[in-house]
Amino acid sequence: MAFSMVTKYAHSPKDIDHYNTDELRDQFLMEKIFNPGDVLLTYTYNDRMIFGGVTPVDKPLSIALSKELGVKYFLQRRELGFINIGGEGKVTIDGKEDTIAPHDGYYISMGTKDVQFESVDPKKPAKFYVVSTPAHRAYPTKKLSYKDAIAMPMGDQEHMNKRTIHKYIDASIMDTCQLQMGYTVLEPGNSWNTMPAHTHARRMETYLYTEFGSKDTRVAHFMGTPENTKHIWLEPDQAVVNPSYSIHCGVGTTNYSFIWAMCGENQTYDDMDAVEMHQLR
């Protein structure tokens, strides 16, 4: 097993004015998330979110972080959410085992001492996309089944953004300290997400782009201030960090899906500042 965690630093809008393509990708893109048998994580200084992939094959994997966070064990002062976008898996949380079907997820409480991730079939490994944020108290651990997620149809065919937002971790149905998490699926023939764009100065967000409509699909992710946007081209199963001042929207050459995760000052999903289309540059 290989375990790695890289650190991404926080930047002001003026910093990224001067970044070329390679510098922008180096600072905001996580190129490799799922690798069989490995745990690959990123620690961003933007609200101190940790995100990445756990891909067990023939033996259980766990996230071993303590010294790096100044704690005795990983979730001593953190909460954790995950969604499985691979084959069928299992998770064992402080000795209690549960099966995890494709697209099922979990919220795991602060104070949980041991979390083991497994794949049912090593030839079809589970791919656990995990997100962890700082926490100040323990809320109940809860399984988040895909069928029970809040499904919000959005957009229309005319604007090429017909999609369904599946809310897994949402303040309207469960308690967390600050983590929010969900899974958005674009319908065939649709390519834009979250357009018109918006910012939410009180929360940062990460996007994992996945389940592309064809092997040649690519997605361009837009970020930066509305008056000075940047873009990053993504392959499947890559993720980007969006600072709170940044817009975050994308367009693909075909349909795709993405997992979003937020943390920050509040958990009000619609607390956002819309960007007028003619403001974008």
Image: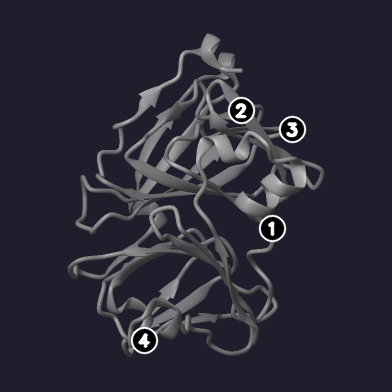
> What element does badge 3 sit on?
loop
Residue positioned 44% across, 53% down in the render: 46
Q: Quadrant of residue 57?
A: bottom right
Q: Which callout, 3 or 1, points to the residue nearer the camera? A: 1
For the point 32% across and 49% down, the residue is 264
Gap in angstroms between the C-alphas marked 3 and 1 = 19 Å
Q: Is residue 113 depicted above or below 82 in this figure?
A: below
* Kind of residue sitting beneath label 1: Glu
The colour scheme of the drawn protein is: one colour
Give the residue at x 29% y 32%: 271
Indicate left or right for 42 with 199 as reference. right
Please, which residue is most extreme toward the right here? 216
Q: Amino acid at mark 3?
A: Thr
Q: Specify the quadrant that holds the N terminus.
A: bottom right
Question: Residue 121's x, y, as percent?
Answer: 62, 80
Q: Are marks 4 and 3 in contact (CB under 8 Å)?
A: no
Number of other residues with Cα within 10 Å of mark 2, as a class: few under 14, some 14 to 19, many 20 or more: some
Q: Earlier in the sequence, mark 4 or mark 3?
A: 4
What SS does tag 1 mark? loop
- 205 or 191: which is nearer to us? 205
The percent coordinates of residue 134 (x first, y second) are 31, 64
Name the residue tied to disc 3: 253
Q: Which residue is mark 2?
A: 229
Mark 3 or mark 1: whose residue is earlier in sequence: 1
Residue at x-position 59% and y-position 80%:
56
Q: Which mark lies nearer to you, 1 or 4?
A: 1
Secondary structure, mark 2, is: strand
- On the image, numbered disc 4 is attached to which residue? 114
Name the secondary structure under disc 4: loop
Q: Earlier in the sequence, mark 2 or mark 3?
A: 2
